[in-house]
Amino acid sequence: MPNKSLDFFIFDENQSSSLNWSKRRVIIEGIAQGLLYLHKHSRLRVIHRDLKASNILLDQDMNPNISDFGLARIFGSNDTEGNTNRVVGTYGYMSPEYASEDDRPAMSDVVAALDSESVVLPEPRHPAYFNLRVSKAMETATVVERCSLNDVTITQDPEGR
């Protein structure tokens, strides 16, 4: 793709300024519509299992394209769930109590909320990920604090992405 991946624009200081908020919203909506198609409207249901910014390619018009289906699972159109024998995808930590299905809106609700100001999604109870900051204030004491800014979580891997 001529514009590389989404992480190139998000995590590069020079490129991130080229994505204004309205363009970011269009990209988010395109990703959500792509996932909705894969999960609900394609002949076979496809679960990506490794969706991240580096797997979203942007075309010449900055339209998002989901890529890297190497870890994807395909289900029949009547299947509603499946099991896997191993954990795959990009590693991260998510506390089990945050992974409850009751906390997550359906993808169709997310797409509807992006298209309409009248659709309201439930407010999440906690961010899915949070960082623990450990600092040594003095040699004899270690301070551990949880960090989250306005219930918005930003994660960064060791490579800066």
Image (cartoon, rainbow, N blue to C red):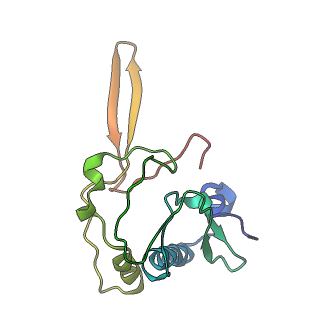
The answer to whether 2 is drawn above or below residue 124 in the figure is below
Image x and y of residue 124, in percent: 27, 62
Q: Which residue occupies the extreme right position in the image?
A: 2
Residue 115: quarter of image: bottom left
Residue 101 located left or right of residue 19: left
**In front here: 94 or 139?**
94
User: Which residue lies at the image location 62% right of the left edge and 66% below the top edge?
Assistant: 67
Residue occupying the point 67% across, 62% down: 15
* Residue at image point 40% right, 43% down: 93
- Asked where in the image residue 112 lies, by quadrant, the reply is bottom left
Asked if 150 appears above or below 145 in the picture, the reply is below
From the viewer's perspective, is residue 135 above or below residue 21?
Answer: above
| Pick the front one: 141 or 70 | 70
Q: Position of residue 39 (x, y in %)?
A: 44, 74
Q: Position of residue 1 (x, y in %)?
A: 74, 70
Residue 120 image-quadrant placement: bottom left
Residue that protrudes farthest toward the top in the picture: 140
- Going 45% across and 77% down the picture, which residue do you hit? 36
Relative vertical location of residue 156 with respect to residue 27 in this rendering, above or below:
above
**Would residue 107 be found to the left or right of residue 53 on screen?**
left
Residue 72 or residue 158, whichever sits in front:
72
Please tell me which residue lies in front, 130 or 133: 130
